[in-house]
Amino acid sequence: VVLSAFGSVIAQLGTRAKPYLPQIAGTIKWRLNNRAAKVRQQAADLVARIAPVMKACDAEGMLGHLGVVLYEYLGEEYPDVLGSILGGLKAIVNVIGMHKMTPPIKDLLPRLTPILKNRHEKVQENAIDLVGRIADRGAEYVSAREWMRICFELLELLRAHKKGIRRAAVNTFGYIAKAIGPQDVLATLLNNLKVQERQNRVCTAVAIAIVAETCAPFTVVPALMNEYRIPELNVQNGVLKSFSFLFEYIGEMGRDYLFAVLPMLEDALCDRDLVHRQTACATIKHLALGSAGLGCEDGLRHLLNFVWPNIFETSPHVVNAVTDAIEGIRVAVGACAILQHCLAGLFHPARRVREVYWRLYNGLYIGAQEALVAAYPRLPEDDEEDRRLDEKRARLLAGEAGEARAP
């Protein structure tokens, strides 16, 4: 509470706090040397809170000195204190920039690499945020070999329980790929698709998609499709998952890769494994939504013919994926094409078949009601003369029946 109050007061004072900064900085340095871990942690947290105000007061020299002091304390044994020290360093790096940072980035980053092995969540989160910030803004200060060393450490962080740590690790892969090129990073990630742990593989798939988004998809797509040739279930599912995230991230650029991935998606949709077909349908959904209105209708109609036989699956996940794929194709190709497929089974003798087709038709009706008007089948109109004759015949019959009943 005291820390929050002090941080708020300094933030509100802004540039008016300048006369007090030397005394505050001296107190912080003194408290960082305290025997009590809680006091050291509080001092490091205070650095993170007042760093923006010190920058506004042109106290960059003081910030640089605090950065050196915090750097010297990176050997801290208590994980909570170490997490706060990393948070303080991150705040200083954010406000004074990479080129003015003391100690230099080339000295700071090698000290952070072993800290990434720490299993404490606070340490992991602050360390990965700091590494990610350096990779984003100051990658040129560090050698490519050091970045590759960090890539191998990041793979371990994909197993973290906390989602924020996994997300930060995945984003850092994108920054590193942008800095040193996608080839080495991609080789590391593709190798990680072979592991058994599902969470690890999913995070790896997301990381591959982010590398593709950062470095352009053509740097990643050939290697991914080559990896699909490995006859191993986990690897193929991981590749399909990567393509699903990739097409979700790149949006309209996906149209350039539709015909490249077509044979792979055909193979996945014909596979006996349910998860293959489910993931392929998710990929087709993102691909269709990204390329809607961009002249890819022929390829998507072709894929629709492979998606459609899966409508009778009973697994809820597969049902959702197939329905989403059909809805995505409906947006890209138009409702009329889907209606032509639906009409074949709306009045099928088997109830189970009718239920599936009516469910798809109802979704189509909700999504594109007005577009269906042009595609409804024409019913023959009654001839006006025939209608009059039928009415006359009915009246005559009614009259004859009335006379027959009379006594």
Image (cartoon, rainbow, N blue to C red):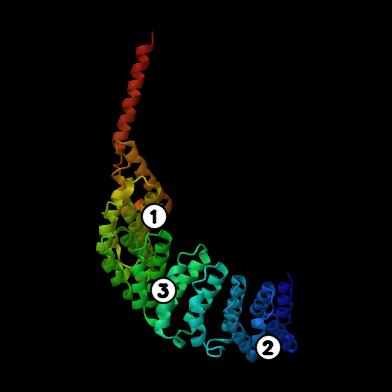
| Precedes in sequence: disc 2 or disc 1 | 2
Q: Which of 327 and 389 lies nearest the eye of the viewer?
A: 327
**Is residue 25 among what the camera can see?**
yes
Instruction: Check the image and report above or below for 47 versus 156.
Output: below
- Nearer the observer: mark 3 or 1; the answer is 3
SS at mark 2 in the image: loop
Point 28% across, 49% down: residue: 309
**Is residue 292 among what the camera can see?**
no
Instruction: Say which residue label 3 marks.
Output: 152
SS at mark 1 in the image: helix
Instruction: Say which residue label 2 marks.
Output: 57
Q: Amino acid at mark 1?
A: Asp
Instruction: Check the image and report above or below for 397 versus 155.
Output: above
Q: Which of 314 and 110 lies nearest the eye of the viewer?
A: 110
On residue 196, which mark appears?
A: none
Distance between the Cα atoms at labels 3 and 2?
40 Å
- The N terminus - image quarter: bottom right
Q: Amino acid at mark 2?
A: Cys
Mark 2, Cα crowd under 10 Å, few <14 / some 14-19 / many 20+, is some
Q: Amino acid at mark 3?
A: Phe
Q: In screen coordinates, is 379 left or right of 33?
A: left
Distance between the Cα atoms at labels 3 and 1?
36 Å
Instruction: Say which residue label 1 marks.
Output: 324
